Image (cartoon, rainbow, N blue to C red):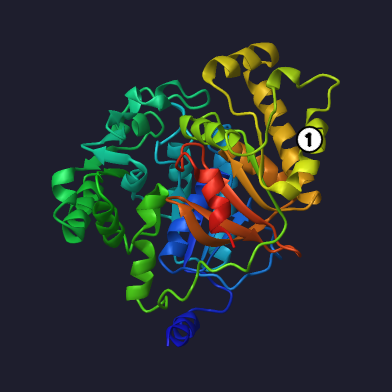
Amino acid sequence: MARASQIKATKKRRKNTILLGAIADDIAGATDLCNILVGQGMRTVQEIGVPGKNHPAHDEDAVVVALATRTGPAKSAVRQSLAALRWLQGRGAKQIFFKYRSTFSSTNRGNIGPVADALLDAMGEDFTVVCPAFPTAGRTLFQGHLFVGNLLLSESFMRTHPMTPMKQSNLIRVLSRQTKHQVDLVPHEVVTVGPEAIRNHLKLLRDAGNRFAIVDAVSDRNLVDTGIACRDMKLVTGSSGAALALPKNFRRAGLLGPDSGADILPSSKGYSAVVAGSCSQATLAQVAYMKNHHPAFFVDGMKLGGKRDVAKEALEWAKPKLADGPVLIYSSAEADVVKKVQRKHGVENATILIEKCLARISRDLVRAGVGRLIVAGGITASESLKALKIQSLRIGHEINPGVPWTMTFDTPPVHLALKAGNFGDEDFFTRAFRLLK
């Protein structure tokens, strides 16, 4: 019955068209969004970069185009995002979602504001919502101030983030530095009333000349109500949590059938490995936990940039151990170690050296028979996917909130888990492999 409903819903739209098209500013965050959509019954594919004109369709309801634009130049972020928009519009997407991190990670000049402005202009729209909250992951928004757990964003670990330090928690102020347009708030007392109240307040803000509306959210219920209120909005922006209700909107419109096993992946084969580049506190704890249970190899940034082939050393270390269970290869380190490496190579070059090395390791591990690979860190995931020449990923079941298993369309397929730095419990790596059949 569910399958029949899905077919009926699919027939209501043109062949090879999609319902939701999303643009994400980093790889791991894109996977997080895909996880939300699959959990709500949307067959979802993640595209790595903007696909070409002849890129095949995979019978999906939603497509998330994953870019690596979170920390690069704003002009490049805008150019890539607009290219993704054009491709998604070519697939017939009825709604566009611009996804950024739940910590609103950006610099004073962007890239969230410039990209959102460019997307609105290209779509002929003049108003949208901004909702980075994700209460399930401990990110809440109250009276326009973003919290990480019980700390203001500016007092959390994000204050000293090496790439995007966030020293301001008031998102109206943050976004106002990135756009010349007006920004205002849908406050908590309005959001708690429900979708109709949110929709009415959004109209008031739009009529008052605002282009962006920051929307408070302290619970998933708030996110769902906001999503319902945005059902007719052509562009929605926010964290992956802000997309919770979007599949329900399509279902109510008769365009999407019931959940029919959208998260089921074929069984996995091959060896298991973890490649970790993130230096977030969550990843550091996960690395420490796995080191106590499985073999681990540290990629020392101080040894890069010279004659030593550290990637080759890592692979030669890993090969004889793969048959006995998962191995961990990591560059994740505390801030003082990272700063030491940055002093030697320069901040930008240090990142390039480490990420290129980890990407090569990921590629060589797969060539050595690894069929189940976890990659931790947004930049690490992006570079690893490039090295593996992976364009598309089918999204499977959730490991932890925000992180699913995925699968390539290769033969044989590779099962991948792309984890944003601050996601996942302490035992994430080991538990993920137990969940994958």
The answer to whether residue 123 shows anywhere in this view is no
The relative height of residue 20 versus residue 104 in the rendered view (above or below) is: below
Residue 347, position as x, y percentages in the image: 62, 19
124 above or below 79? below
Q: Which of 311 and 133 is in front in this view?
A: 311
Q: Amino acid type of disc 1?
A: Trp
How many numbered circles does the render carry? 1
Give SS at disc 1. Answer: helix
Residue at the far right: name it.
307
In front of the other: 167 or 96: 167
Left or right, 323 with respect to 203, comes to right
Q: Residues within 10 Å of mark 1 (few under 14, many from 20)?
A: some
Residue 242 position, x and y percent, is: 36, 52
Q: Can residue 103 be seen in this view?
A: yes
Give the residue number, with chain letter if any, for mark 1. 317
> Quarter holding the N terminus?
bottom left
Locate residue 327 relative to residue 376 in the image: left or right. Answer: right
Residue at 55% x, 61% y is: 395
Residue 100 location, quadrant = top left
x, y percent for residue 128? 34, 50
Q: Which residue is drawn at 55% across and 55% down?
A: 434
Q: Is residue 278 left or right of residue 241?
A: right
Q: In this view, does 357 lie above or below 102?
A: above
Q: Nearer the viewer, residue 141 or 201?
A: 141
Residue at (33%, 40%) from the top-left corner? 138
Rendered-image quadrant of the C terminus: bottom right
**Image-quadrant location for residue 357:** top right
Q: Residue placed at 44% from the left, 34% from the top?
A: 105
Residue 271 appears at what percent x and percent y? Answer: 71, 52
* Viewer-proximal residue among 253 and 76: 253
